Image: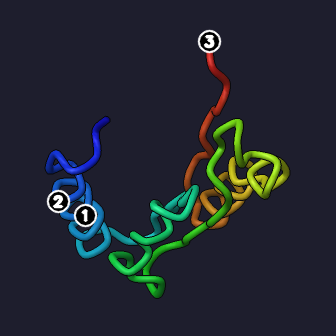
Amino acid sequence: SHQHKGWEIFTDSVIQKLSEEKKGMVFLLWGKFAQSKERLIDPKKHFILKAAHPSPFSAYNGFFGCRHFSKTNEILRKLGKAGIDWKIG
């Protein structure tokens, strides 16, 4: 319901701006649509982790077990940054 309402232009601009101005970010691209945004990210400056979308229809096709949360924290710690507390609640 939110597609084709201009959000694509906005999110593309945000991703591209972050990629240009920051360094050492971890991008989690879940699903084919998110993975199409990879072209906006400079892989020499950032880390890109890709997996299936976590929806009930595709989560078993590569999202479960991808370990993106722990991999992100490993990358951040190697960069001398604090890991993320991924717990909800």
| Residue indicated by mark 3 | 89
**In the image: residue 23, left or right of residue 65:** left
- What residue does disc 1 label? 12
Disc 2 marks a residue whose amino acid type is Ile
Tell me the crowding category of disc 1: few under 14, some 14 to 19, or many 20 or more residues within 10 angstroms, Cα based: some
- Asked if the residue at tag 3 contacts the one at tag 1, i.e. Cβ–Cβ closer than 8 Å, the answer is no
* Residue that extends furthest to the top in the rendered view of this protein: 89
Res 9 label? 2
Residue at 74%, 51% in the rendered image: 63
Q: Secondary structure at mark 1?
A: helix
Q: Amino acid at mark 1?
A: Asp
Question: At 25% across and 70% down in the image, what residue appears?
Answer: 16
Q: Nearer the viewer, residue 40 or 74?
A: 40
Instruction: Count how many numbered circles sit on residues in the image.
Output: 3
Residues at discs 1 and 2 in contact (Cβ within 8 Å): yes
Q: Quadrant of residue 66?
A: bottom right
- Front-lying residue, 66 or 33: 33
Does 66 sit left or right of 4 as displayed? right
**Is residue 19 depicted above or below 80 in this figure?**
below
Q: Quadrant of the N terminus?
A: top left
Structural crowding at the residue carrying mark 3, measured as other residues with C-alpha within 10 Å and reported as few (<14), some (14–19) or many (≥20): few
**Foreground: disc 1 or disc 3:** 1
Where's residue 54, x and y in %?
Answer: 66, 43
Amino acid tagged 3: Gly
Q: CA distance from mark 1 to mark 3?
A: 30 Å
Q: Secondary structure at mark 3?
A: loop
